[in-house]
Amino acid sequence: MPGDVRNDLYVRLVRGEFDKGNKTSQKNMEVALEIVSDQGIVLQDCIQQGTGEPSLSKFYSTVLYHHSTPCWNEAIRLSVPIDDFYNSHMRLLFSHCSTTRNEKKMCGFSFWKLVGDRGTTIKDGSHQLYIYKCDDAGKLRDPSKYLGLQSGEEEAASPLENGVPPGTFTRNTREAVHLETLLCSTKLTQNPDLVSLLKWRENQQSIEEILGKFTSLGGEEVVKFLQDILDSLFSMFPSDEVTNHNSAVVFQALVFIFGLLENDKFSPFKPVIDAYIHNHFSAALAHKEMLQCVIQLSGQVRCMEEQQPLRTMFDSLEIIFRFIVQSRLLFARATGGQEEQEFQQELRSLFAAFSTTVCQTGDAITATQCSLLRSLPCIVPDAMKVISPKELSELLCGVVNSLPEPQELAAHCGLVPAKLDYVGNTVGSELFETCSEARLILMKMCVHHLRLQFEQKRELDHCAEILGVALKGLHKEAHISKRKETIWQEVDLLVSPMWDSTVVPSMLDIILQAIRTTDRRSTTCGQLVAALVDILRLMDERHYRQLWDSFTADRKTLREFILRAFVVFQELVREELYPTDWIVMRMVTNNVVLMSVQEFSQALLCHFLENEDFDYQLWSAFFSSTVAFLTQPCLQMELVSKQKRDKIIDRYGDMRVLMGFQIWNMWSNMGPHKIRFIPGMVGPFLEVTLVPETELRKAILPIFFDMIDCEQRARGSFKQVESELIDKLDILVSANKGDDEYRELFKTILMEKVTQERPSWQENGTLFINSVTSLLERLLDYRNVMQGEENRNKRMSCTVNLLNFYKSEINRQEMYIRYIYKLHDLHLPVQNYTEAAFTLILHAELLGWSSDELLAELEYPRQKEWQRKEQIYRRILDLLDYGKAWEYGIPLCKELAWLYENKTYNYSELSKILKRQSQFFDKILEECRPTHRYFRVGYYGKGFPLFLRNKMFIYRGGELEQIGPFQKQLQSEFTAAQFLSNMLPIDSSIMASDAQYIQVASVMPIPEPLEVFSQADVPAQVTLFHRNNNVAKFQFDFRVIKDNNTTDNEFKNLWIERTTYTTSHKLPGILQWFEVTEYRVESLSPLRAACDTMAAKNLELRQGISNISSVAKSGGAVMNITDFSRLLDGVINAAVNGGIKNYQEAFFVPEFAQSNTDECKYIDWLKDLMNEQIHILNGAISIHEQLVSVDWRPFHEELTKKFKEMKQNVKKSRKSLRPPIPLRRSTDLSQTSLTSIGSTSSLTTPAVTPTATPTLAAAPVEPQKKATVTYRVSEKLPHLVDRDAALKTGKSAFFYSYELPSQPGRPAEKVKRDSGYLSNTVIPASYDEGGGSSVDTSWEQTSLMTSKLSNDISLQVSNSGGSIDSGVSPGQSPVLQQHEVMRQSWSSTDTEHSADPAPPLPPKSPRGLAAASVSSLLSREPSQKAVEAHDPPPLPPRKTSKGGDVMLPLSPIPYTHPRSPSVGESVSSPTHHSVAPPVFRTASHPTSQSPLSPPAVPRQRSLTKADSVQLQQTVPTYTKYCSSQATHVTLSNLGEKPPAPPRPQKTKSQPNIMFSHSRSLDRDTRHIPSVPRRVSVPPQPAPNLEALPEGDRL
């Protein structure tokens, strides 16, 4: 800065070169540097080594040991006073430092003058100094002795003035020292031309030459000595002391300096100029010469070929004028204001010269004119010091108005932007801000030139920027004055149109048009918007009044202007117009728009409301802009912080409420024109009411009542309002708008209006309001769970609620379909393929197979109806295939097959769909399909949404999903919920609490009674699917310990509370869960609970065997039997509950039977179940032995050991005495009518009354009556047929043929023979090549288990289209179904052969399972090994070759084998001595019955085809027999009937096939039939063969 002085010389001692002389080693050189004056005085404290170090008078270098070329690189700074700098030099002394004597010996010196002979200092750079020999420092006391020597290469030797001869000091040419210097000084220069300028007085005749050399200097040297140079140049202007006439040359030198400062490189030195002008400038007469030079050069713009000097002068005009003004002020101060008129005249001449410069045209001078226009406004701050503001503004306007016409300006590139820069800089100057008169003049100039540019649509960004500058000045003035009246005229220039021959649009209208056509993403648009907001903020009521009055003569122009304004207002509130964090700008804009809309609405009411003047487009634009204003995000105060919301409310108020009342006011004034906005404005107004502001909602909601009433009056109904409101409500609420408060306000306000007004449509309106309220509730629930993966299930529930609403309540099919596909899209990401398929079925059900053309919808193109349904079906089939629900896809395949076969005749597609259907059948039987588990989930507490609160649901879990993972999934969905660990009933306090409670439990499905369960030959995969799918009833058991006083065995007090749940829909369905609509609770006694538990465990074992057998059959290379092993271990080695031992100790003791006589019937049932479990485990152990690996072999051996112990315990329980039960004598069949038998005989179990609850396993009751009936069999039984079917299915095939004998009044009835397959029955057989059969008679080869395991034994025989099932009652549980079928299939009649040898025996166990092969039934040779066996034989290896064993399982039911009595002998005291194998009997139950009496059958003789067999059958106690006209066949196990006294030895043609069967008759059809018990049978008379017809004898 001026006044600052610095003179620093930086010296770096680089290196030296020294000669060792006559020494053997190199010297240890030290350098000492000092500053010495020409008089030999050493300057003190002028050397610094670094910052913070003390100043030195002498500097010593580092000593390098024995080094001839030491390299020091040590830097120092020499701070020599400016007065001593010219007469001083630098001296270096070299000394050798001895290491032995500790002394220094001088050996030479060097020197360097700081200032040269021409007055310049040492040049920056490297220097080599000579070293002169000197061994005595005293010789250097007089510098004159060596200053005449040559100091280095750059300096020549000069003779000394004192005459000392040279040669006093000699130089060693091999020695030298190297230095580097750098000068930093504001007074010392290294340039001789600059020195000449600074000393121009010494050579005044060469001023032109000196200044010429000066202007060629570099800027670095000039700016360093700026103050001294300016002092020298201004001193050259003519004055009292200087009379030269070189003013022009001096001015050019000044322009050169000022031009350097305009360069970016030297622009930081401009403050130096400012400081110089205010503090050091003193040339009071310079303004005269400088003004003349500027005027003269400006007038020569056309004549000068080289325009660069002129451009440089105009570029530096600001600094030049600053010097002129400062010089004038100094002169006026010195002279008291003399020559003021002359100075003012010169200034006017100067601006006239400027005007002359800009009015000319030409490409050569365009750049010069641009320089002038850009620089001239910069002189305003200084010019205002010497010119009045009004005159200065007029002078400035005169310059810009002198420019050529816009058409000519457009031809010169760059002149238009320069003009706009001039206008912008002028209105942005202090002149515009400080003086109202000047501001009005400049504003007119600005508006005029901007209007011209907007009309040409050029430089719009520049114009917008200038307009912003002008408006900023106006706002600043209004803010300072606190009144808008001070700028009223300037604003009026912007607002009011001008009238010439035609109307000239106002600047406001021009800006509105420009905003509509400008790219929203450009900066120009932002500047125009800011300008528009500023203009509207500056307008008041007078401006609006004057604006409307100016359009009185042209209503069309007014309409276009208002329409443009509303459109722009709508754009102003768009979210993307401003950056998101510009909250202040948004609020200012909204406030301006609000006030403007209020003013513009008055114009609508005044000019466009009457019938002939009503303009729909204008009013529609008004409503659209106001709706956009109210729904913009930045005005939603609920989305910002409380502090920010409070500040906005305090400053602007709630602008939404004010705009809402404005809408209501305008709507109320529309009168009959309202109907034109229905239903168009329903959606926008609905969106406004969804804004979360209570007062706003109260203001707008009554409009809907007005709309309904208006449409009802005009059109007779309000269907359009209803339809539009529902459509838009769905969209808007889904977009996260609306809340529960809005739902309440909607219903309250509209219902209140309906109640008060009581319109004619009150009833329909009430229904409509309630319907919309219900829709709102569902939509809000849906909206609340739209986000987050954890809310996916909630979204599904809400989606289902909505699609049901649209279908059932308001019948909106398009909305219904939309939500169908929303639900479908929710299922796919979580792989709910089955549910997704059921969802699409909802859409398919709406379509038919017609050829009607359908419009494009969702992802479907325009197509025929059958094509769309076909496309949907194919998608459904794919989903069902993925979900392994092939059973549901088969009916769809059949429909498509019908379509291709009968409608489109597309046999190619028919073939494909049939193949796919076949694949579905194959997959059902072959592919592994784990079952799905079901869970009951209860949501309790007010913390849950309404669609979950205090409700229970049944969930369909994933494949093999356990309750633990399922509960974790729920916990991730309801993180705040508390899971209840107990299964106790929920207390009312929990339901009323604000928290969230969840109760989860596993439940068992209860399938509906289907025909598939009654068929004997249905594969296990099929029945298993139907047991776990398409179910709506579920069962949950809760164990309760009652009367816990006895602690010896907890099972005596262990009750079961069984709850049966009914869901609203069957599972699987469109959801993985459905709400529980009904549930019932019943209690099971401890004994019944034990039976139930055993039956359930037996079923679990069968399923486990079935699963592991299916995997083994599939031939998998790797099989995991861990689950199977764990299942067996849990049953055999029951460490937790103690297994069946606890049941034996609890219930098989006499004390229990005596104290619980009413439950004695369940004891036998429990024993049956135990025996059944032993038999199942026996086969399971065999399977486990075949599949277990070597590593698990010890575990298997331990399991086998435990199993044997378990069997021993069970055998002991068989010997326990039964409690005394009164026996009933059986009734003679001759005394029983067939009608009564038929009325109670059926293969179905008792029907459950509607109030009864299905149970998992029910106990038997006491039999009440026993009866027998005799049939005639016309063919030997059994008979094996169809070997291929038997080999393929593993089932036994039999013919059944029988004949009803004639009775009095009724002829003999032939029954058609039919064939059937007995499921799960083993007939091991081999076949010869001729097709005959040969059966193996050894019992050891008979298989008791198979890889296919069914849950029941059933048989179906069709005759005349009828069919029967296996006695499964509706709603009966799988375990109960299986148990009852087994009871129907096996007999416990206590009769056997008395004379003939028994056939091969089955396992001998009390009430054990009877099973035999065909060979054992036909062969009369006993198998002693089988007789001695007490347990079922082990499972033999499964053979797969033709003719091998066919393996089948049998469901075990125990039975006894007492000795058969002789004729006439009572069977009340049987004696056990042998075991008879079971055979099968058939029973026909025609619907038409008549009394029958048994025929006399011979006891023994040779058999013919007409042989008769007396069969005793117990009349079954079932429900009412089905009324179909079909022949029903019952398959039972028959004990062999005792024959007559011995006769001669039988032949092969005389086998004994006399059998009997008994069945209990229970009059109470509400209960399950009891287990058959031994009863007394009256002696039978000997059969009379003579009574048989002749043709029936052999």
Image (tube, rainbow, N blue to C red):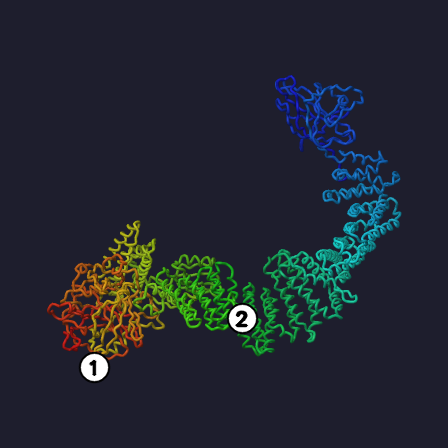
Q: Can residue 1053 be seen in this view?
A: no
Front residue of 230/801: it is: 230
Residue 742, located in which quarter of the rendered image?
bottom right
Left or right, residue 630 beside residue 333: left
Q: Mark 1 points at which residue?
A: 1304
Check disc 2 and give the amino acid type: Val
Left or right, residue 1002 beside residue 1534: right
Residue 1394, located in which quarter of the rendered image?
bottom left
Q: What element carries label 1?
A: loop
Residue 572 on image: x %, y %: 66, 61
Q: What element carries label 2?
A: helix
Q: Name the residue under label 2.
A: 772
Front residue of 1144/822: it is: 822
Cα gap from disc 2 to disc 1, whole angstroms: 76 Å
Left or right, residue 978 beside residue 1288: right
Q: Can residue 727 be seen in this view?
A: yes
Q: Please tell me which of labels 2 and 1 falls first in the chain.
A: 2
Residue 573 on image: x %, y %: 64, 62
